[in-house]
Image (cartoon, grey):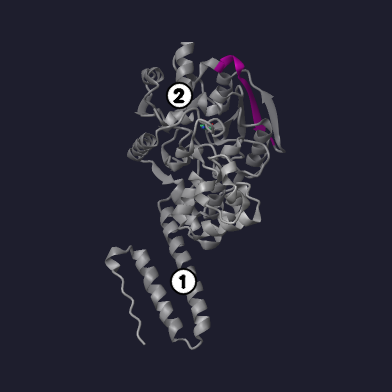
Amino acid sequence: MAIFFMFNSSNLSPSFNTFLTSSIFYLSTCLFSTKTSSSVLKITSLNSILYKEFIRGRMKNLIKTGIVPRITSEINPLKAVILHRPGRELERLTPQNLSELLFDDIPWVRKIQEEHDEFVKVLKENGVEVLYIERLLSEILQDEEVKEEFIEDLLQLNGITSPKILDFLFGLLREKPVDELVEISISGLSLYEAKVKRSLMGLAEHIYEEDYYYIKPLPNLYFTRDPAAVIDRGLMISSMKAAARKPETLIFKYLYNYHPLFKDNEVPLFYDNTYPHSIEGGDILVLNEKVIAVGCSERTSPQAIEQLAHNLFEKGSSVEKILVVQIPAKRSYMHLDTVFTMVDTNRFVFYPGIKNELKIFSLIKEEKGFSIHREKDLQTALKNALNLYTIDIIPTGGLNAITSAREQWNDSTNTLAIAPGIIVTYSRNEISNKILEKEGIKVIPIEGSELSRGRGGPRCMTMPLMRD
Ligand SMILES: NC(=O)NCCC[C@H](N)C(=O)O
């Protein structure tokens, strides 16, 4: 008996060609072996080993781009970021669930994608490598064992406890191609879409709310700044305050555990999403190699900051001082980067409306543990911490309280520095942008009419992996 294998190698990438050729070679050696049944087993397992090798090869290619997570500055030339292009998860927003999902309005999906694509274009034109979180996740889920573990964790995180439903959904998701599974893990899976058979919940579906989700959608994922942050050579996986954002950190946990980007670079973990006290990436500003600022805010608690300090000081990071900036615990200033960002070596943008409500502390690394000090004010604390003679604090929206409050609400303070003195902002914040330009800052404006409806700006939409 003869078996012919035909494939058109000219259409395939060289690595996939190698993969196919070696699979066929191994298949033939197995077929020529005498013990057919054990050969069949071998073929299956070898194929999956070869496939894993193929995927690993693809992931190694990614590493060859030279990305090693390291952030020791807020402003040095930005080299690589993790982003998420807003997608179908936003189509889940309704007037009823908006506030639970931390939105103030419903974005127009096609338009928000166009705006996000323009943002990506600006980053790429300025030499920033953009890695999409959905692609990184797909890469690691090609491994069948990782895929199954991920599905189990995803279902557990979404609070599915009924064995019948658990069993059904596990089977359903395992059968899905990886890209579809990734899509579902981000955009959610509703009761109607799942069509769970033979379960009371499925049969009695009419008594449940229309928008009941087995897997909850993650409309805030395009704010990749918050679920994780690179500090020095390590990673902080946030413990998110709101239930609506907790599952975002599962994705980062999997990237941390399995993606060569982190796995092959021996990246220490400075905070874990399983810790009980909440902290989010928008509250972390890496001012230089030795100093970070951390917002004590609506989302980040003092206990979490102490835990982070302990880990940074004990696990060999370069950080020696943490400036704790306590801001009012209000939705409009949910993170430090909604009221304060760094735009140049000694220049910062700040929302003056909270000037009188700030409290500044510093945590200083000691031989054993750390000491805590109360600081006079933000300007003095920054000058001392960064060893600078002068600090320029630029008021967002100028000194008119109304303009300043209006533009802060639409993220005028949430600037993203892509190099010293060069920032990306929303074009809608015209007054703040003009003031920055007058100060000699190069402002690259992007459209943000829809993007800003999620209450975040260019800084919130990036998770920097590497700066010069
Ligand atoms: N760093 C940031 O300020 N991120 C913006 C997050 C907005 C999102 N809707 C939230 O409330 O978490």
Q: Which one is nearer the viewer's eye here, 33 or 296? A: 33
| Residue 106 is a magenta residue | no
Q: Secondary structure at mark 1?
A: helix
At x 52%, y 83%, the residue is 37
Q: Which residue is mark 2?
A: 410
Residue located at (55% from left, 36% from top)? 281
**Which quarter of the image is occupied by the N terminus?**
bottom left
Which of marks 2 and 1 precedes in the sequence? 1
Q: Which residues are magenta?
A: 354-366
Q: Position of residue 326 (x, y in %)?
A: 62, 24
Q: Which residue is mark 1?
A: 47
Q: Amino acid at mark 2?
A: Asn
Q: Position of residue 70 (x, y in %)?
A: 50, 43
Q: Residues within 10 Å of mark 2 (few under 14, many from 20)?
A: many
**What is the distance, in whole Å, between disc 1 and disc 2 at their CAs?**
52 Å
Q: Nearer the viewer, residue 42 or 106?
A: 106
The quarter holding residue 243 reads top right
| Image vertical order of residue 168 relative to residue 302, above or below | below
Give the left or right position of residue 30, taking residue 204 as reference: left
Q: Above or below — where is 392 with respect to 60?
A: above
Q: Give the percent coordinates (x, y) of residue 73.
A: 49, 35
Could you say which disc has been placed on residue 18 in the image? none
Residue 441 image position (x, y, % from top left): 38, 24
The amino acid at mark 1 is Asn
